[in-house]
Image (cartoon, rainbow, N blue to C red):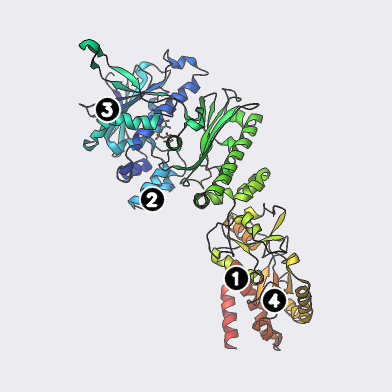
Amino acid sequence: MTEAVHVETHGFQTEVKQLLNLMAHSLYSHKEVFLRELISNAADAADKLRFKALSEPDLYENEGELRVRLLIDKEKRTLTISDNGIGMTRDQAIEHLGTIARSGTAEFFRNLSGDQARDSQLIGQFGVGFYSSFIVADKVTVISRAAGEAHDRGVCWESDGSGTFTVADVEKVGRGTDVILHLKEEEGEFLDDWQLRTVVGKYSDHISVAVEMWQEPREEEAEGGEKVITPGEWKQVNRATALWTRTPRDISDEEYQEFYKHLSHDYDDALAWAHNKVEGSQEYTSLLYVPARAPWDLWNREQKHGLKLYVQRVFIMDDAEQFMPTYLRFVKGVLDSNDLPLNVSREILQDNKITAQLRKACTKRVLSMLAKLAKDDEAKYQSFWQQFGNVLKEGPAEDYAHREEIAKLLRFASTHAESDVQNVSLEAYVGRMKEKQDKIYYIIADSYTAASKSPHLELLRKKGVEVLLLWDRVDEWLMSHLSEFEGKQLVSVTRGDLQLGELEDEESRKQQEELAKEHAGLVERVAKVLEGQVKEVRISHRLTDTPSCVVTDTYGMSSQMMKLMQAAGQPVPEQKFILELNPEHALLQRLASEADDARFGEWCHLLLEQAQLAEQGGLKDPAGFVARLNKLLLA
Ligand SMILES: Nc1ncnc2c1ncn2[C@@H]1O[C@H](COP(=O)(O)OP(=O)(O)OP(=O)(O)O)[C@@H](O)[C@H]1O
């Protein structure tokens, strides 16, 4: 390397500064991860070069043997991770090693609490990449030259991680990147050849590029007492076989987990995986993982997701989202196809028959992996559901073809256990259905409490009919796309005329009719008062303890849907409710005997408003309601 020229000092992006500050403290207990990250980056650089060289073979500069090398210098206390991959230009080094180019990053950092234990978990989810070097190094020097550039177009990037970095032009003959870690005083263990070999082996066995370490010259005694000197040499320390190309039965769980961490930059183990090699009309290998924890940006619309795509073992692209539907965006993995062309691009993938087939196959694999997990290990499945249930709930709307399979994976709270734990499957519900029950009943409300205490459940509770309780934002969307399960209709108990079908015996049907007839006068009187404010007034048969409730007609928009639209800033059409009255309630009996028309009117409004309050959690005119209530209390 010749003398550095054109030296500039740059400040790190604010978020990088924050990350560097936090990392050294929060990640100390995971300090080895820097090796995984740097070896991953070096392997990625080799993959990227291999891909680019498909169309520009000159980029190999007559050196097509790709490898990563680790070199210890005990005197200088440095550890160098060196690759002959794609390399970086000066501008790329400034951009890639000074900023974090992921949307939502600033917001992520605002959410850190300062609590070390919690933050280290979050940072683990975020992925620290190159910056993890500063956990063990007090200075990092990166010398790089991009493939295809002249030797004097190298760059030297250097920083002590405290807020700024310098870049300078340097000469570098060999293509690729050297990351030189000037190890902190207390990090001597990484200067120990044997210890390093063990860690490196663990982190790099499954990656396809060779990782080498320098073996010092050795003097050995041969037979007959003769001394033989083996000269120093670079020795490969990893197996260098891409994990997914191996036979599944020869791969240990630890190896699968290690590969997952390399792939995902997650610190935790994966929850489950599926490894499949398919031959025949389509030839591909897929290795798909379900993480144990949701990533920090799961709900960020621009979140990068998708599989790592290889074609005939050659890396093509990261985050190929075409192979996974959005509702499975949490899946990480590798897809290696033999059928796609090597020059495949995102555009070609977009509208391609093979892509569509692979997407279908990968979707099926994930759904069956989840079904197996649910069957084999309920506790694990429950933890999956807590992390990703709300994403999976987008499934029936997005993927009509797999609706039934997805429906089997859904979990709900229900009146069966009277708990807010979402662990009831539709199959379990159906298994518990009453003898003459032919529908699956559910309610959607604002919260678990609002759902489980809803007056709409009164009759069903009395009859011992189980009701699914839903309160997540996505539930209205889910249920509008899930009308049936195993031939049984899913019915909201807040909609229209609550039809109990065969659950209602002839006698109670008659009773209802009689009740309606008996109170027809009262209904008419109330309807007159509330004319224009409600769609209809009728006698209820779903209430037992509550005087009144409001329902939407069978095809009307539910109050939850209205709220969702309002929250999304969309115009909500004026919607009138049906008011149902419980004639057996003492308040209604009092109302029926109220002779004073003015007071009768006040009571009618109060019954409507309290029903709306219970249903929607709010009123258009709360002050008016309170005034009316107080007036009647004093009357
Ligand atoms: N050895 C290398 N050779 C070439 N480019 C590199 C090398 N190391 C890092 N880079 C560049 O720097 C970028 C940032 O690296 P960093 O490890 O911080 O994040 P990343 O690898 O992109 O993300 P993540 O670690 O979350 O996957 C890389 O995307 C790559 O462009």
Label 2: state its secondary structure.
loop
Q: Is residue 367 above or below residue 463?
A: above
Residue 193, numbered circle: 3
Residue 11 makes an appearance in the image = no
Q: Is residue 259 above or below residue 73?
A: below
| Image-based side of 453 in relation to 252, left or right | right
- Contact (Cβ within 8 Å) of mark 2 with mark 3: no
Q: Nearer the viewer, mark 3 or mark 1?
A: 3
First reached walking from the N terminus: tag 3 or tag 1: 3
The residue under label 2 is 112
Residue appearing at x 57%, y 80% in the figure: 627
The residue under label 4 is 581
Three-letter code for the amino acid on which mark 3 is drawn: Asp
Three-letter code for the amino acid on which mark 2 is drawn: Leu
Total numbered circles: 4
Residue appearing at x 75%, y 74% in the figure: 508
Residue 120 % position (x, y): 36, 47
Q: On the image, which quarter does residue 215 sit in?
A: top left
Label 3: state its secondary structure.
helix
First reached walking from the N terminus: tag 2 or tag 3: 2
The residue under label 1 is 614
Q: CA distance from mark 2 to mark 3?
A: 37 Å
- Contact (Cβ within 8 Å) of mark 3 with mark 1: no
First reached walking from the N terminus: tag 1 or tag 4: 4
Residue 241 % position (x, y): 45, 25
Three-letter code for the amino acid on which mark 4 is drawn: Leu
Ligand 1 sits in quadrant: top left
